[in-house]
């Protein structure tokens, strides 16, 4: 009987051992998609939202007053469901390139840059411009993100030395100099198709370089994150505090932004 | 007179091999110089008497093995002061080149074959995990390595897939003495640090070994002197931090039955970006039973487990997220019978279960590989030997099967001269990655698997001659490989209807020829002077288009190692060594526009370079050694740091200390 048992169990055991698909799974963390959260203190909402901004050709728009109104009605409101995506307009097929720049027209600006994977980008050389339509946007929005770049809807930004957004208040930014959006034609990289030739087209658009510094391209293709609290003054004069707390997805995809906000600051 | 002395020393040294070295030291009638001389003669003989296993899968004396086998001995490893196998092969083996791909993932080229075509084994067991088709070389620390056996040329008849370009077998130490305890530390440029501990013990029927290694080095920047290089260059070198721990134990259950088990852990961290360091983990283990059924029959049954994981540690979120895991389970049965006239029959079978999980795959995949092989080592006469082998492999993916033969002949007209001729077929099945990969490389292109890949196959012919005389050892070898269906990534292309996303798909290239020659000369004089010269010529001739410009071997490479060793008295001895490696230039045709192949190619010049190293080590009282090294002695710096330029910033210094605690008296 025991021999029969051995004859049956031994091959089974061998089969189990020899087809092992790994050990120590528990040493690693399980990827969990970032969840939104919000809390209300008086008229101020402190929330966390997650945006997959990794696509090259999309802007994602967030409207803080709208978010707040939803949260005020329902504190468990899913902030991750309330941002809107607009594609970057590309030139119509056959549109001829122009070899002039400096006109600040919307479209695609082709630049050569002197960097590749394993290097930092140090300089750009203009190649040609191809006109395209203006960037569409929703009727109401506060700021928008595209990979690591940010633009505001007539707002301006100041970077503080605060690390904890819960301490942000209007008093923190008294006397601070806020930077408005500025024209860029080398930052909003929107097509990686010729990257190996060190040719990258960028959208010509106004962006906020101070707020965009929360995630900077370092040694390619890696990003360096700045987790300080940024103060965003909206066009209506109200102020929001923003903090980037992560730029990776649960599966380590870059430019997936977890943003904390506090609005309106009192 | 010199010949007489040499013969006398040889006889002495053979006798010495049968006795413990310390007994000789205890003989007060011998002078220090005599002892020194005898030790060196002993060393020479022991090199020739080294038992190797890789060429035939059975133990053979190096001088008698019918398959030309290069051995990097414990002495070579110690003198090279190498940290891992990459350091060692780079320093000691002519024709071995390591190049750097994107993000400084390493690619090895050994006589025209890159990493995926050379099978690397530890004690005969396969290793899991790869990056850019190469194993993680840093995981093979030299702490517990006894020797490394290198067999170039197709060895698929014994080792199956991936042994198309050769086999590198790392043999770990086996406890011989009642106990040993070795400690060493080293510090150098770029905050390079290394700490090793090795201990083993042999008590009655039980023996064990413990090895621990810790290394670290900082990231550093490079700047091109020629800022208008025609090729892409590298500006950042990533240091790493590694931890390795191993434990192995053996029990001699009976004189004829030996059971052994081992466990190991390795971890490496690379900070390519500070908030998400890359982590590489390896968990390994195995059991083996070796049974001498009779004095002529030997059987081994072994199981080996190796799991190699990659993860990114998200420092901000405190999450260690695994994105890659490769597990190899290997079970082997090996039987050999020694016939009375010296012939050896070896038969065996393996079962390999290969599992791969990766973010670059739609879902985890696995593959089963079964093989059976037989080899007959026929001692035709005292001068002639013929080894023939055949192997059958079956792979579950695509129900692929393959038969690979090999025949080798060895002729020893005199005890000093050995000629070897070998023909073998090589074979490499597409890996799971090559079949199923779907990797978005930073938005540049998608590296895509190809389920229709055919296996790579080859014919290999090699001829070598070896001559030993008065301490001189000459080896000259030539080889030719004809490779069919070489698997690599093709040129980038757009799929119909999608002009924005580039794809880089694994393909079968056209036929490929790899041929070359190698000359090695070694000599050690009784005055303590030693010399090892190596030269290789390699030619790769590829038809078909590939987008991998940094892979070809440089045509010529030279290695030189000279050292002088002297034991002045019982208290101290000295070893000074000068070693160097020189590579010829290579002009490579690279696509002018990877997005438009019709734009043609342009030549990119990769200049020749030479790197030299000076080492001095002082031995104190048999148990202490202090070592100083000047690396890149002549302060070589490339004009631009491209993929196969040495990533050096100029002359650097290393200091080290090693202690053999068990030798303290």
Image: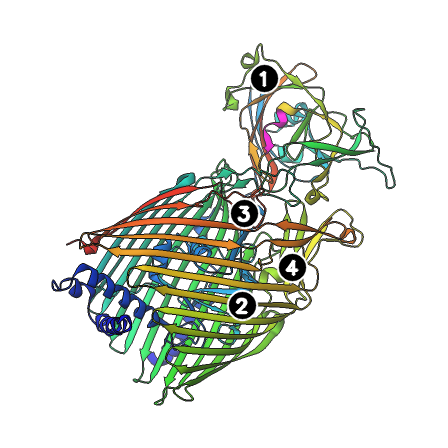
**Colour scheme used in the picture?**
rainbow
Q: Which mark is residue B517?
A: 2
- Label 3 and label 4: CA atoms lie apart by 22 Å
- Chain ID, mark 4: B
Q: Residues within 10 Å of mark 3 (few under 14, many from 20)?
A: some
Query: Which residue is situated farthest in the top direction here?
Result: A175
Q: As rendered, which of B245 and B20 lies closer to the eye?
A: B20
The relative height of residue B240 versus residue A242 in the rendered view (above or below) is below
Q: Position of residue B359 (x, y in %)?
A: 58, 51
Q: Which residue is mark 1?
A: A265
Q: Residues within 10 Å of mark 2 (few under 14, many from 20)?
A: many
Q: As rendered, which of B527 and B509 lies closer to the eye?
A: B527
Q: Which residue is mark 3?
A: B104
- Label 1 and label 3: CA atoms lie apart by 46 Å
> Where the N terminus of chain B falls, by quadrant?
bottom left
Q: Which residue is mark 4?
A: B449
Q: Position of residue B240 (x, y in %)?
A: 45, 44
Query: Which residue is situated farthest in the left direction here?
Result: B28
Query: Which residues make up the magenta segment?
Result: A211-217
Give the left or right position of residue B383, taking residue B210 as reference: right
- Chain ID, mark 2: B
Q: Position of residue A36 (x, y in %)?
A: 58, 34
Q: Earlier in the sequence, mark 3 or mark 2?
A: 3
Same chain shared by disc 2 and disc 4: yes
The answer to the question of whether label 3 and label 4 lie on touching residues, with beta carbons closer than 8 A, is no
Q: Nearer the viewer, mark 4 or mark 1?
A: 4
> Where the C terminus of chain B falls, by quadrant?
bottom left
Q: Nearer the viewer, mark 3 or mark 4?
A: 3
The relative height of residue B399 versus residue B381 in the rendered view (above or below) is above
Q: Earlier in the sequence, mark 2 or mark 4?
A: 4
Q: Is residue B141 visible?
A: yes
């Amino acid at each position: 009987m025991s021999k029969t048992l051995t004859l049956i169990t031994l091959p089974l055991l061998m089969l189990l051992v020899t087809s092992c698909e790994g050990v120590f799974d528990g040493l690693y963390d399980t990827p969990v998609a970032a969840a939104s959260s919000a809390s209300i203190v008086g008229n101020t909402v402190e929330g966390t939202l997650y945006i997959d901004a990794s696509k090259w050709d999309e802007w994602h728009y967030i409207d803080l007053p709208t978010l707040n109104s939803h949260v005020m009605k329902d504190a468990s409101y899913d902030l991750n469901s309330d941002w809107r995506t607009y594609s970057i307009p590309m030139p119509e097929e056959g549109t001829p390139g122009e070899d002039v720049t400096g006109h600040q027209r919307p479209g695609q600006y082709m630049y050569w840059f002197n960097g590749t994977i394993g290097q930092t980008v140090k300089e750009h050389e203009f190649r040609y411009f191809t006109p395209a339509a203006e960037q569409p946007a929703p009727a109401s929005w506060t700021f928008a993100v595209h990979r690591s770049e940010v633009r505001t809807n007539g707002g301006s930004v100041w970077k503080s030395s605060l690390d904890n957004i819960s301490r942000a208040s209007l008093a923190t930014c008294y006397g601070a100099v806020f930077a408005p959006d500025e024209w860029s034609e080398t930052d909003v990289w929107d097509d990686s198709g010729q990257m190996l030739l060190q040719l990258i087209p960028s959208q010509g658009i106004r962006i906020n370089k101070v707020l965009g510094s929360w995630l900077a391209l370092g040694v390619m293709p890696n990003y360096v994150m700045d987790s300080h609290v940024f103060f965003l003054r909206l066009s209506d004069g109200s102020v929001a505090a923003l903090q980037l707390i992560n730029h990776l997805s649960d599966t380590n995809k870059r430019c997936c932004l977890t943003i904390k906000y506090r609005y309106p600051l009192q | 007179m010199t010949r007489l002395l040499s013969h006398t020393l040889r006889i002495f040294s053979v006798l010495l091999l049968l006795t413990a070295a310390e007994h000789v030291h205890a003989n007060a009638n011998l002078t220090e110089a005599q002892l020194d001389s005898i030790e060196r003669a002993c060393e020479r003989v022991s090199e020739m008497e080294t038992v190797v296993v890789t060429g035939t899968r059975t133990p053979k004396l190096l001088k008698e093995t019918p398959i030309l086998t290069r051995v990097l001995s414990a002495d070579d490893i110690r003198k090279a002061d190498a940290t891992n196998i990459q350091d060692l092969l780079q320093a000691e083996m002519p024709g071995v080149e390591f190049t750097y791909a994107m993000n400084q993932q390493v690619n090895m080229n050994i006589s025209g074959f890159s990493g995926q075509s050379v099978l690397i084994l530890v004690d005969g067991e396969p290793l899991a995990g790869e990056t850019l088709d190469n194993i993680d070389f840093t995981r093979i620390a030299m702490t517990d390595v006894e020797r490394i056996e290198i067999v170039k040329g197709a060895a698929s008849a014994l080792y199956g897939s991936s042994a198309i370009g050769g086999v590198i077998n790392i043999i770990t130490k086996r406890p011989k003495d009642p106990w040993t305890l070795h400690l060493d530390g080293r510090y150098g440029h770029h905050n390079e640090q290394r700490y090793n501990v090795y201990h083993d013990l042999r008590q009655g029927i039980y023996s064990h070994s413990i090895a621990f290694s810790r290394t670290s080095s900082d990231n550093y920047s490079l700047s091109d002197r020629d800022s208008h290089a025609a090729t892409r260059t590298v500006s950042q070198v990533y240091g790493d931090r590694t931890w390795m721990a191993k434990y192995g134990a053996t029990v001699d259950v009976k004189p004829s039955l030996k059971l052994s088990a081992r466990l190991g852990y390795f971890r490496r961290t690379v900070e390519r970006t500070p908030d998400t360091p890359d982590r590489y983990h390896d968990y390994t283990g195995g059991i083996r039973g070796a049974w001498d059924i009779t004095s002529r029959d030997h059987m081994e049954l072994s199981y080996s487990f190796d799991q190699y994981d990659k993860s990114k540690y998200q420092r901000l979120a405190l999450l260690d997220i695994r994105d890659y895991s490769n597990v190899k389970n290997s079970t082997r049965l090996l039987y050999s019978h020694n016939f009375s006239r010296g012939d050896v029959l070896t038969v065996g079978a393996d079962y390999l279960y290969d599992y791969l999980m990766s973010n670059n795959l739609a879902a985890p995949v696995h593959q089963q590989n079964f093989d059976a092989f037989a080899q007959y080592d026929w001692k035709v006469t005292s001068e002639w030997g013929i080894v023939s082998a055949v192997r059958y492999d079956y792979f579950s993916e695509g129900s692929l099967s393959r038969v690979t033969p090999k025949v080798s002949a060895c002729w020893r007209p005199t005890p000093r001269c050995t000629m070897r001729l070998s023909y073998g077929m090589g074979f490499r099945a597409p890996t799971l990655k090559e079949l199923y990969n779907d990797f978005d490389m930073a938005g540049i292109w998608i590296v895509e698997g190809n389920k229709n890949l055919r296996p790579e196959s080859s014919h290999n012919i090699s001829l070598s001659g070896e001559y030993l005389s008065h301490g001189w050892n000459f080896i000259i070898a030539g080889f030719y490989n004809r490779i069919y269906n070489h698997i690599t990534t093709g040129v980038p292309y757009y799929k119909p209807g999608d002009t924005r996303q580039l794809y880089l798909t694994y393909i079968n290239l056209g036929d490929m020829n790899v041929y070359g020659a190698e000359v090695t000369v070694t000599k050690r004089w009784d005055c303590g002077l030693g010399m090892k010269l190596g030269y290789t010529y390699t030619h790769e001739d590829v038809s078909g288009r590939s987008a991998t410009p940094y892979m070809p071997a440089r045509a010529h490479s030279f290695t030189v190692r000279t050292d002088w060793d002297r034991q002045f008295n019982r208290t101290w001895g000295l070893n000074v060594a000068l070693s160097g490696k020189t590579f010829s230039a290579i002009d490579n045709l690279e696509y002018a526009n990877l997005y438009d192949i019709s734009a043609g190619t342009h030549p990119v010049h990769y200049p020749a370079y030479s790197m030299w190293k000076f080492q001095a080590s002082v031995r104190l009282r048999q148990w202490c050694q202090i070592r100083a090294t000047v690396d890149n002695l002549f302060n070589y710096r490339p004009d631009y740091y491209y993929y196969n330029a040495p990533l050096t910033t100029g002359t650097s210094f290393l200091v080290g200390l090693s202690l053999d605690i068990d030798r303290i008296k």
